Amino acid sequence: MSEIGIGLVGGGYMGKAHAVAFSAVAAVFDTPLRPRLQVIAATNKASAARYARAYGFGRATADWRDLVADPKVQAVVIASPQSTHRAIAEAAFSIGKPVFCEKPLGASLEDARAMVAAAEASGQPNMIGFNYVRTPATQFVRKLLAEGEIGRVTWFRGEHTEDFFADPAAPASWRTTGRANGCMGDLAPHPVNCMLALMGPVAELSARIETVHATRPGGLADNDDHGQMMLRFASGAMGHLYVSRTATGRKMGYAYEIHGTKGGIRFDQEDQNAVWLYRAEGPEATRGYTRILTGPAHPDFGAFCQGPGHGTGYQDQIIIEARDFLQAIHTGRPVWPTFRDGMAVSQIIDTAFQASDDGLWHAVPQS
């Protein structure tokens, strides 16, 4: 076993989650590489020092460049605003350091393409953070689909719905300004990644993207609140995706429903430890969806708990991501999703904006 120095850019919501994950991952998964929290960077010295004390980092800095250059930092984790992702990743790759970057890959498709180019030119391990697709339940669904459990898939419906901007009296903030901070930039990458993982490439799409509350206390909202896409997958299956930050009553509505010729599957992240599976077999009178509670028989569950139905949580998804990143570094082999997989998500979102602008169906570029 050997240690690896971790540098974390950003100490807020996701920064804390990654700090906890890299502190716990070796104990949970007995990883060959043992993370050591070396340096954390934040927007000012006071907050960086506060995060370092709280999370157990050896040093704090207000300059991410200082963190990237530090010889004790052997891998860089980016959990800062998406407008900063490209510069940090390019700097790390230029001196041969692996990078894990939170979604979305960058603030634009142009950023995503540049980051993929930098990653692949460097030859360094690279991953993007799509944590929800790593629940034992959704990993199990991927396995069911790969094994043809519900036959040929004919239809997919996905959503990511939350309500943190459902109230028109919620004040304007940085989230209501700039395309990258809108619903399509913030929430949509997660379900787009999910549908690519479960269904494969999207061939073409049509979209509508709108602002629900254009005027808010303190200012105007110039980005989108919700959007929907009609989809045709490369497999020939049809689909629909809806994303919203104004879905009253929804807190973590990352959900999907899949129809196949031999059955169906339903999942909702608000009940993340259960999968509903329908098999079109046996007498009609006894058919029905079966609720399957995840347990040690499902992917990655047993590392956290030996009791079926006891459940895993949000933080556990981030620990699984940390395990995968360390595995990519240790083996030198890519672990999904890489930066290129993140760029595929950015490509779909960019195409959706084009389709919403002109009202036409658009083919989705595959590179």
Image (spheres, helix red, strand yellow):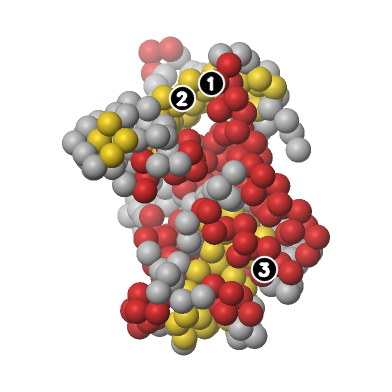
Q: Residues within 10 Å of mark 2 (few under 14, many from 20)?
A: many
First in sequence, mark 1 or 3: give its number: 3
Disc on res. 356: 1
Mark 2 in CB contact with mark 1 (< 8 angstroms): yes
Name the residue that disc number 3 marks.
91
Residue 176 sits above or below residue 328 on the image: above
Tell me the quarter of the picture where residue 267 sits: top left
What residue lies at 24% left-to-right and 42% top-to-bottom? 218
Find residue 273 and report its horizontal and vertical position in percent: 38, 46
What residue lies at 45% left-to-right and 82% top-to-bottom? 60
Tell me the quarter of the picture where residue 101 sits: bottom right
- From the viewer's perspective, tell me whether residue 246 is left or right of residue 180: left
First in sequence, mark 2 or 1: give its number: 2
Find residue 132 and report its horizontal and vertical position in percent: 47, 47
Disc on res. 189: none
Q: Secondary structure at mark 3?
A: helix
The amino acid type of the residue labelled 3 equals: Ala
Find residue 145 and report its horizontal and vertical position in percent: 60, 33
Name the residue that disc number 2 marks.
209
In the image, 140 versus 327, the foreground residue is 327
